[in-house]
Amino acid sequence: MKMDVLKKRIGIIGGGQLGKMMILDAKRLGFHVVVLDPTPACPAHSIADKQIVASFTDGDAMLELAEKTDVVTYEFEHISVQALKELESRGYTVYPAVESLEVIQDKFRQKTVLAQAGIPVPAFMQIAKRTDILDASSLYGYPMMLKTCLGGYDGKGNALIRTEDDMMDAFDALGAGSTPLMVEAFVPFVKEISVLACRGIDGEIVVYPVGENVHVDSILDTTRVPADISDGCTEKATKLAHDVMEVFHGVGMFCVEMFVDDQNNVLVNEVAPRPHNSGHYTIEACLTSQFEQHIRAITGLPLGDVSLRTPVVMRNLLGEPGASGRTRVLGLEDAYRNPRVKVHLYGKEDVKPYRKMGHLTVVGKTLEEAEKEAETAKACIKIVGEA
């Protein structure tokens, strides 16, 4: 007899904001959720049915998580692949697939696999020693991006090399060869975009509308949907997201970040095998949010409609410069004077400068209206530490 999918128990590795928002939709559907996170007061702890307090590299803790649940998923990439492989070898279900995560974790391998599949990506090469950077400069010219192959997020693990003088400083700053490095040719992009896509257990793939992203100091600041790009670029981006899903055979949500250059070429920058910051707009603006979709996918439920109901703007809410200590949110009442503003605070007990503490979303009749109101609302809110 087929198991009632709503009786499945879900294990989530990571209790940050993405894990928390997954749980909110999982609980709405009646699922039992266990989260693994080393921080006892992580954002997800207050709503999970159980938390296992342990390191993301603790294989025994991951085994405990798998034993207590029917399917295991994760909210971020930087976890032990070996531990997840051990779970799969014992017959436990992990989504998205560990083989896809292993490739995606290593940016050089990720780019290599994408390029071999015919997916357009920036030119790249592996760096083993300082002189390799000189070789790259002769191939790609300046500027170019030096990146760590493993780890890195929100601009961490990247260094822009503008001239030969920057070369050695960048090499030393990223570990001087102690960790795998790669160089990418700099893309003179005019737009940064991202596309969410999801695969169900039955193989069905759905692709969300194209979002346009703005980063400030390498941290996502704004996502606008629909993206202000040509119909041709929209078609290319949508097809690329679908093609990437065919390369990585994982069940669940993926986000494909892309560049649009000055010739209207669309190139894939990075792939994330999980719900994504740039997809938070889906909570208010799509018929099925990225979080509900992920839960549907990994539990075997049919996928939901991804149609955009209205133009939307999402703005991240970060800790103020110099902020530290227990979190204090100022100006929320002022922001809420606009009834279309929706604020999501993640429940992080402590604030740090530029830490992602929440986001806000505004829907509107037009993108311009939503953007103006989102800017006004964001200006009201300050996230600081208690004096």
Image (spheres, helix red, strand yellow):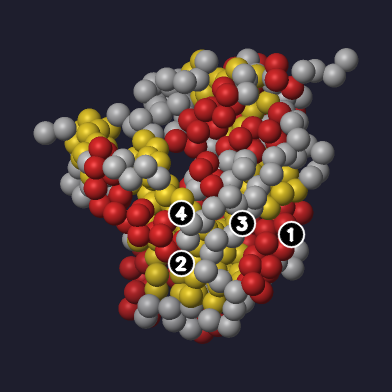
Residue 62 appears anywhere in the view: no
> Which SS class for mark 1?
helix
Closer mark to the observer between disc 4 and disc 1: 4
Q: Position of residue 88 (x, y in %)?
A: 72, 30
Q: Position of residue 270 (x, y in %)?
A: 57, 58
Residue type at tag 2: Leu
> Which SS class for mark 2?
strand
Q: Nearer the viewer, residue 346 or 208?
A: 208
- State the CA–CA distance, disc 4 to disc 2: 40 Å
Q: Nearer the viewer, residue 53 or 279?
A: 279
Mark number displayed over residue 243: 1
- State the CA–CA distance, disc 4 to disc 3: 16 Å
Which residue in the rendered view is the most extreme toward the right? 1
**Residue occupying the point 58% across, 37% down:** 291
Q: Position of residue 246 (x, y in %)?
A: 76, 54
> Which SS class for mark 4?
loop
Residue tagged 3: 209
If you read the primary sequence from the N terminus, does the residue marked by circle 4 or circle 1 appear first?
A: 1
Left or right, residue 365 beside residue 335? right
Residue type at tag 4: Gly
> Which SS class for mark 3?
loop
Left or right, residue 20 beside residue 104? left
If you read the primary sequence from the N terminus, does the residue marked by circle 3 or circle 2 appear first?
A: 2
Q: Are marks 2 and 1 in contact (CB under 8 Å)?
A: no
Residue type at tag 3: Pro
Q: Are marks 4 and 3 in contact (CB under 8 Å)?
A: no
Mark number displayed over residue 146: 2
